[in-house]
Image (cartoon, grey):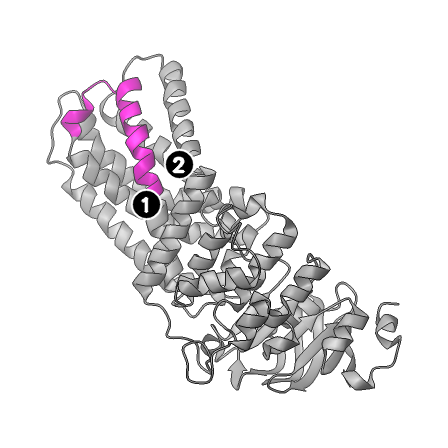
Amino acid sequence: MIELRGVGRRYGEREALRDVSLELGEGQTLVVFGPNGAGKTTLLRVLATLLRAHTGEVRVLARNLPEEGWALRGLIGFLGHEPLLYRELSASENLRFHARLHNVGLERVAEVLAAVGMEERSGEPLKTLSRGMVARVAVARAVLHDPRLLLLDEPYANLDPGAREHLQGLIGGASGRTRVICSHDPGGGVAEADLVLGLREGHQVMLKRANDVREGEIAELYR
Amino acid sequence: MSPARSLASERPSEGSALAHDMPLRPPSLTGTVAALLRKELLVELRTLGSVPSMSLFAMSTFVIFHFALNRNSVDGDLAAGILWVTLLFAAILGVNRLFVADADQGGFDAFLLAPVDRSAMFFAKVLTLLAYLLVFELIAVPAFGLLLLGPSLSAAMPELLLILLLGDLGVAVIGTLVGALAVHTRARDLLGALLALPLFVPIVIGGARASSPLLALNHHAGSSGRWLATLGLYDLVFGLIAYAVFDFLLED
């Protein structure tokens, strides 16, 4: 599903990611931990085809990146720090726009809006909604086209516990999708993971099965 | 069962419409352009960020020219020069805002993640800017006729409309190219203007020379064919260049 071999990425002179290697199987969840600036978001954007790796090999869903990146579009659900939604448009207008870009039937928009609990306020411009509500709409946007691979950057950051529980079926383990999640929540993150990756200043400092992670080991990454 | 769980448990089985190894059938180029254009116009209608500011700028400029030249009316070369310089400077405001919502609100990433032909964004942005310019000129050109122009504007029609349309097409193509280049830089407003203005010079020359006889007191049509052809050729050349390089501007 995902294979990385010695993957690196620079921004100018600064190495944001260096020599990252791992394999993740179909339906599994990789959780990436690391302090701010560790390279988590860069890794996610490389997997999403939004950034090119400068070194190493990247293979996602049996496609080599960046050469076959075009074939991956539409198979990935990406939930980054930005909701990728237009503030002036309503949830419904935003999702209809994305549905057209992905050639998804417009009836799917109503389905995902109901699934994230936003059908009642779907006609209001996003700029009038709370950050938590916008985060729900962003989840709906990420799963609108039923992607096989979910790339989630701190997906629960703006969500209350109720919403988090509510969205488990879409982006949680219950979704059955392969997932890569960036997280700062050691307890919740490891509980969701099959595989745990630790990054620090772009370097891969830990790669373990979740069952093998010692208590307090994730917290050490942040010291 | 919550709607989310319900949706997850009802995920389509293999072979159904949404469970896929391959992306869903990608939308057509025209469908994608239509979706993007619709979104652009909706955002502009809600924000009123481009056309009103372009119109206000043009009105203010006409009034300033009125006082600066200390003349009640202008005609011929002077009228054509004032009209085209004002239109192109006002267009810069639209160019600078063309990609701002996409850059600031993640529209680029969302577009790049979709299984669509990337040239769709080029066509949609050209059409968007063209629509802004046409609506803007519906306000600015009659205002010019009222505030500054000596001869009757109606006498210059419909030739002036054709000249304006060719000029607008060139501005839309160059503006889209320049807007996409500048939007990822810190000084995008400055860079957009610096890149666009030299490229607009042939449009100013062609547009002003073609319009000048139409705006003269002794109005005479039919002498602007050479400049119309120049404008058309410039539009075509820049259209092809912009179409060829636009995809690369979206790439990492």
Q: Is residue A65 above or below residue B174?
A: below
Secondary structure under tag 1 reads helix
How far across and how far down the image is residue A162, in percent?
Answer: 69, 60
Question: Taking A117 as reference, is A156 left or right?
Answer: right
Instruction: Tell me which segment is drawn in magenta.
Output: B130-156
Judging from the image, mark 2 belongs to the subunit labelled B
Q: Is residue B189 above or below residue A199?
A: above
Instruction: State the residue at coordinates (25%, 27%).
Output: B77
Instruction: State the residue at coordinates (37%, 72%).
Output: B26
Question: Is residue B135 highlighted in magenta?
Answer: yes
Question: Taking B4 as reference, is B61 left or right?
Answer: left
How far across and how far down the image is residue B11, in percent?
Answer: 51, 77
Most common secondary structure along the magenta stretch: helix
Q: Is residue B148 visible?
A: no
Q: Is residue A43 visible?
A: yes
Amino acid at pointer 1: Leu
Q: Is residue A27 above or below residue B125?
A: below
Q: Of residues A47 and B87, which is closer to you in this image?
A: A47
Instruction: State the residue at coordinates (22%, 39%).
Output: B163
Residue named by callout 2? B51
Residue named by callout 1? B130
| Label drawn at residue B117 | none
